[in-house]
């Protein structure tokens, strides 16, 4: 009949150390993939729930644009003061902004 060791090894294949390494590596990759997949799907689900439906956002943006376009203009003294302040800012910070754009490059919108 045979001993227990003979019976338990019957039909088993002995793997080389390299094969054992690859089997373990594949099992680890599968486990890591499952964890990453779960984490990504869970995070995406929570992110989508937090953002919600954005249709209201664009409706509000559209209303704000129409409101700004239809708004009354500034009074003349305030407008002149604002334009003067913008010119000061342009003179003060213009060289820094110009340094950010390489010469002979056109800025594309």
Image: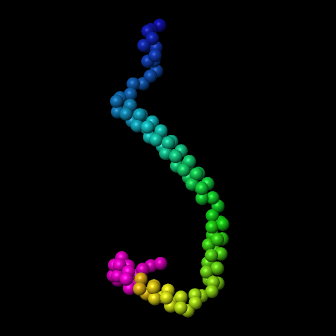
Colour setting: rainbow
- Vertical comparison of 60 with 93: above or below: above
Task: Name the outermost residue toward the front.
Answer: 77
Above or below 5: residue 109? below
Measured from the top left, where is residue 23 in percent x and y?
A: 42, 34
In the image, residue 27 lies at what x, y percent? Answer: 45, 36
- Residue at 56 percent of width and 52 percent of height: 44
Picture coordinates of residue 70, whole percent (x, y): 64, 84
Can residue 105 be seen in the rendering of this structure?
A: no
Q: Quadrant of residue 65?
A: bottom right
**Which residue is most to the top?**
1
- Residue visible at 61% across and 80% down in the picture: 68
Left or right, 72 with reference to 24: right
Image quadrant assignment for residue 15:
top left
Asked if the magenta segment contains residue 96, the reply would be: yes
Q: Viewed as shown, does residue 60 lie left or right of 11?
A: right
Looking at the image, is 82 positioned above or below residue 56? below
Q: Is residue 2 visible?
A: yes
Q: Residues in magenta?
A: 90-109
Give coordinates of residue 76: x percent, y percent: 55, 92
Total of numbered circles in the picture? 0
83 lies above or below 23: below
Q: Residue at x 41, y 85 (%)?
A: 88
Depth check: 60 or 23 in front? 60
Instruction: Say whether residue 30 is magenta.
Output: no
Q: Residue at x 49, y 45 (%)?
A: 36
Which sits in the foreground, 49 or 34? 49
Find the residue positioned furthest to the bottom: 76
């Amino acid at each position: 009949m045979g001993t227990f060791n003979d019976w338990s090894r019957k039909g088993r294949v002995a793997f080389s150390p390299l094969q054992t390494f690859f089997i373990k590596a594949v099992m680890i990759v599968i486990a890591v993939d499952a964890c990453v997949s779960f984490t990504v799907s869970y995070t995406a689900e929570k992110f989508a729930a937090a953002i919600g439906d954005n249709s209201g956002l664009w409706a509000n943006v559209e209303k704000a644009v129409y409101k700004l376009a239809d708004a009354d203009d500034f009074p003349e003294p305030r407008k002149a003061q604002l334009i003067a302040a913008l010119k000061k800012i342009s003179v003060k910070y213009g060289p820094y902004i110009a340094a950010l754009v390489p010469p002979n490059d056109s800025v594309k919108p």
